[in-house]
Amino acid sequence: MPFRYPRSVEHVDPTRPSLALDQLQLALEGVPPLSAEERLERWLADQPEETAQVHAAFLYLRDANTRSARAQRWADWRAVQAPYDRAWGWLVPGGTEVVWLYDEAGLAYVDGLFLATLLCAHAACERVLAGCLQMYPEQPDKNWLRWGLGPLAKSAFERDLIDSALRDDLAQVTEVRKVSAHFKPPLTPNTVMLRAFERAETSTAQSDDELLDEVLQDDAMFALKVATKLIRGNQGLSRVRLY
């Protein structure tokens, strides 16, 4: 048996499901060795309770099974950002929270958490527009700090902070977020369920869950595109005029 150097302590991955993967496999003629995924699946089936190693094994399998899809979604997100890339960065109104929300929106999209993407992108847009409006000596209304994205976008357009196309896109983000974040009857226009039903005949989805996922992913990508255009494009603070 060939000699193997022991792994040093600093290179041991504490998240590795070692109980399942470090078991010895004998080399038997005519018996192909099990893959790491096969070993984990068999090991998990025999576990009577949840432990840290069980969770690590489950996450290991999930990571392997979803890596390709996540990589593609990361590429899609970068394709949205690429036209706005700048070596010196961006001046973002609305506080550091805007950057957090925008990054969370993108990372949630990569992980397939599409509703989280929509909610974070919506909130990032709200903060950016509110930060722009705060630059003006005269505020639009005494209660403007309580406004949602719809009124903020309308007021920003009136001050030439955003163009009509972005105003309309922000209104659409508001609409799809509203029917998901607030209770609406199932047949209310623009609900996820209704839009999924409407696209059923043309979709290649194999199940209702996949069909719903398609609609949610489209909403998430649209919200990401709008947030990127607002935060990184030639909008917002770069067009503020102080009177």
Image (spheres, rainbow, N blue to C red):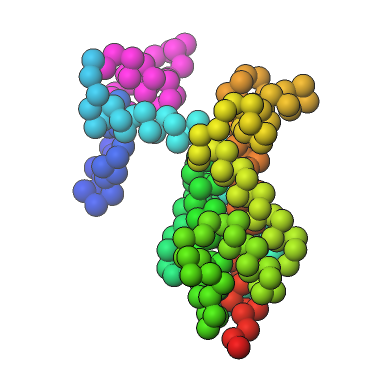
Which residue is outermost to the front? 142
As drawn, the residue found furthest toward the right would be: 202
Name the spot of residue 152 as percent of width and height, x first. 58, 63
Please give the name of the residue rendered at 53% of the width and 69% of the height, measured from the top-left corner.
141
x 49%, y 51%: residue:
120
Image position of 8 with respect to 83: above or below: above
For the question of whether residue 162 can be seen, the reply is no
Above or below, 211 relative to 215: above
Q: Is residue 83 visible?
A: yes
Closer to the camera in the image, 114 or 77: 114
**Residue 239 part of the magenta segment:** no
Q: Position of residue 109 (x, y in %)?
A: 54, 45
For the view shown, which residue lies furthest in the bottom direction? Answer: 243
Horizontal relation, residue 100 to residue 87: left or right: left
Magenta span of residues: 21-47
Residue 43 image offset from top left, x and y in percent: 32, 19
Q: Is residue 232 above or below residue 224?
A: below
Q: Is residue 39 left or right of residue 101?
A: left
At horizontal 64% and vertical 26% (from top left) the residue drawn is: 187
Residue 52's x, y, as percent?
Answer: 24, 32
User: Which quadrant is the C terminus positioned in?
Assistant: bottom right
Query: Can you say which quadrant of the picture contains the N terminus?
Result: top left
Q: Quadrant of residue 216?
A: top right
Question: Viewer-proximal residue, 69 or 19?
Answer: 69
Q: Is residue 158 left or right of residue 116?
A: right
Q: Is residue 44 magenta?
A: yes
Q: Where 238 falls versus 19 (above or below)? A: below
